[in-house]
Image (cartoon, rainbow, N blue to C red):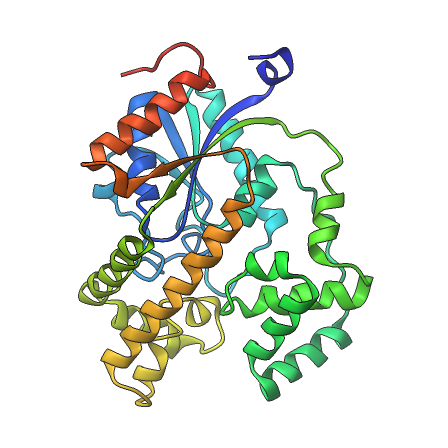
Amino acid sequence: MNIEKQNKIPVVAVVGPTASGKTALAIELAKIFDAEIVSADSMQIYKGMDIASAKPDKEEMQGIPHHLIDFLDTNEKYSVKRYIEDASAAIRDIISRNKRVIICGGTGLYVDSLLQNIVFEDEPDNTTVREKLRLRREREGIEALYNELKEIDPLTADSLHINNEGRVIRALETYYLTGEKPSVIRERSKSVPSDYNALYIGLCYKDRDVLYERINRRVEIMTEKGLVEEAREYFSVDKKNTAAQAIGHKEIIPYLSGEISLAEAKDNLKKATRHYAKRQMTWFRRNPDINNIYIDEYKTFEDAVSAAAQIIRDSRIFGEGEII
């Protein structure tokens, strides 16, 4: 390891599409390397939105501390800039206790903004422009605005889920106020070297149908666990809050309104989740530094864990050996 990297904070990032097994892998690696986990999931931050976001419960965590999970009310706004601030504070806390750090999540914008030191200045704010965009959303639907963003700035569009209406509108607002693509602004902001020496481990599937089957199965499990009841609770409180617009809730709401059957709602959720997974895979494929672990090439999950642990050992990012 060169001197420059020695002076940086070592971090392992476990990334990949939804339902790929990131959480389980990160927990096993944390047990091996005496680490704590900092979440990079834009939905798991919200209190109570447990089922839709596939938030790990205490049993799944196996005693491994998780940071930036379940701490924000669904009516609160949360920005990438704030995530960087909160994640940086969590990492400093973990390091101060001589623990190691594992970032885990599928929100690529969170992960890369944190580890690549993308600086977010205060975003431009213009009520008139935003109101025009919101009125267009009411008339034309979010799909029209999302497609417009995709034409203007495909990099930013691919990083956002179509259901994330606030960020889609915010990205268009930034473009119309500054005349620049948000992705160009982010790239230019990488003016200061990162504080982190990051090792990326990406979970992938050679056979994409295997991942899609995992997604389909997850939706069925989520429904059995009470997804409909969770969506009903948030929908009844505020139809426009973050939880009501989140993937996993938004697809259930037409069923709650009596517009479609539960079977149709579940099919819509499976389809939306598969599309989201495709966008996540597209995002992470752009990173040439990711060490890919193809889960379906291993006989057991334990074999995949061993392969990921060996990548970490070989990199020596955490120093010599591991703590068991």
Q: Can you say whether 267 is above or below 202 in the image?
A: below
Quarter assignment of residue 58: top left
Q: Judge left or right: residue 289 versus residue 44.
A: right
* Residue drawn at point x = 37 percent, y = 75 percent: 251
Query: Of 108 and 240, which appears nearest the observer?
Result: 108
Q: Can you say whether 215 is above or below 90 in the image?
A: below
Q: Residue 78 at what x, y percent from top left?
A: 56, 56
Q: Judge left or right: residue 278 versus residue 226.
A: right
Q: How many marks?
A: 0
The answer to whether residue 114 is seen in the rendering is yes
Q: Residue 82 at what x, y percent from top left?
A: 60, 48
Query: Of 186 and 298, which appears nearest the observer?
Result: 298
* Residue drawn at point x = 60 percent, y = 79 percent: 144
* Residue drawn at point x = 50 percent, y = 46 percent: 284
Q: Residue 292 at what x, y percent from top left?
A: 41, 36
Q: What quarter of the picture does the C terminus occupy?
A: top left
Quarter assignment of residue 79: bottom right
Q: Judge left or right: residue 177 versus residue 165.
A: right
* Residue drawn at point x = 70 percent, y = 66 percent: 152
The answer to whether residue 85 is seen in the rendering is no
Q: Can you say whether 247 is above or below 27 in the image?
A: below
Q: Residue 239 at what x, y percent from top left?
A: 45, 78
Q: What quarter of the picture does the N terminus occupy?
A: top right
